[in-house]
Amino acid sequence: MTVSFSRAAKRGKRRAGIAGRRKKEKKRIYRAAVIGCGRIGSLLERDRLRPHPCTHAGYYGFHERTKIVAGCDLRQDRLEEFGRRWKVPPSRLFKKYQDLLSVVKPEIVSVATYTESHCEIVVAAARAGAKIILCEKPMARSLREADQMIRTCRRSGTLLVIHHERRWHPNYRAVRKAIQSGLLGEIRTVVGNVLTSEPRRDWHANPAVSGGGPTLHDGTHLFDAIRYLCGEIVSLRGETERKDPKARVEDTGRAWMVLENGARAFVECGGRREYFNFEIDIQGTRGRIVIGNAVYRAWTLGPSPRYEGFVEFSETAPPPPLLPDTFPFIVEEILEAYEEGRASISSGEDGREALRCVLGVYGRARIGSGFAE
Ligand SMILES: NC(=O)c1ccc[n+]([C@@H]2O[C@H](COP(=O)([O-])OP(=O)(O)OC[C@H]3O[C@@H](n4cnc5c(N)ncnc54)[C@H](O)[C@@H]3O)[C@@H](O)[C@H]2O)c1
């Protein structure tokens, strides 16, 4: 399979001494292990409506340069299903990630467990010699954990990648390129939402395990996508809300932000809805794009059909995708980043920044002056 790379993905600093690695490792097959064989680790492949592959195991099972060699989960039933689906023998299925790391020594490790163990497993995998770690979002529960993950991976030369998957999506990449080329003029207003039902009553509702409610669980994607598309968030003020005063995580979070170019942004996460919706509405001085899970539309300027002498938005085709599909590109881009000795387009530092925004909403981090004049 051949996937063309955008120039953006080819940019980035090369680490000293490893620039020639790509040539040497070009044909190499990487041995991958998945820790956490739940929904995003493997089970979502059961969903017939999704494009496939759509899980960590799916990525490695599908890509010609990766091979799934082991799995780990606390639950026996999930391990057995993982073994059956990906043809991993029982001797390579583990209940303790420590055993997997020491016995198998995988080159790629996916961390798809609850948020509480992301830091501990990433640190252990890096120390055990993993070359690439693909860690689920949210990266961690605190900036202290995120910093430890980044620091440990830097020391061991491990490429740390956070699975904010929209960064690899062809439509999001096309929108980023369109914005950078000035198609919308100067970005002035961004409104994003990830609206969903109340937090599930499982591990999601326990902040010690999940780290927080929907502002963290889903909002991390929103903050990350806004940064990716529109630039740094330099000031943030937030609020949380919970209908049930006994609930241990919020059901709604909101943030008002200032972006680096002075644009204003607003996001809402959770919101006790009877549906799921993710979208970002980006308005510039000369155009508008709305992109989300169920929407992809664009407008540029045209003469008003209603009022003489007025200029209005006129709907146009959105920017064409740069790549054929998302998921092969994730593995492709990660391998290329590792072999070229550069950061992935979804680095540990990017994951930390999204986390910092969420913690800003929770009042546990300060971003800029809190709000702008
Ligand atoms: N990027 C995305 O779009 C996306 C989608 C879904 C979930 N996620 C994230 O992925 C992570 C997992 O979510 P999920 O929905 O797959 O949850 P899940 O409950 O379906 O699966 C998690 C699995 O991890 C296992 N596990 C937990 N702790 C473990 C440990 N210490 N060692 C080994 N196994 C362990 C559990 O037994 C479970 O099977 C969360 O961080 C979540 O936010 C991301």
Image: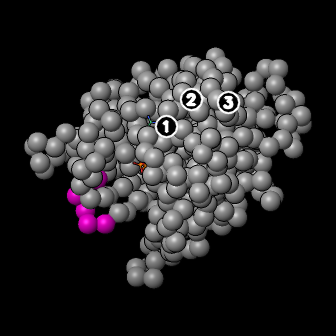
Q: With 322 as the anchor, is 269 left or right in this view?
A: left
User: Tag 1: residue type?
Assistant: Lys
Quadrant of image for the C terminus: top left
Q: Is mark 3 within 8 Å of ligand 1?
A: no
Q: Secondary structure at mark 1?
A: loop
x, y percentage for residue 103? 64, 29
Check if mark 1's residue and mark 2's residue have beta carbons within 8 Å: yes
Q: Amino acid at mark 3?
A: Lys
At which x and y percent is residue 230? 51, 46
Q: Secondary structure at mark 3?
A: loop
Q: Please name the residue shown 59% across and 57% down the image.
A: 84
Q: CA distance from mark 2 to mark 3?
A: 10 Å
Which residue is under mark 1? 95
- Dot 2 or dot 3: first in sequence order is 2
Q: Give the mark, 1 or 3, whose residue is nearer the N terminus.
A: 1
Q: Quadrant of residue 114?
A: top left
* Element on which disc 2 rests: helix
Regarding residue 173, the answer to whether it shows in the image is no
Q: Which mark is residue 99?
A: 2
Is 57 a magenta residue? no
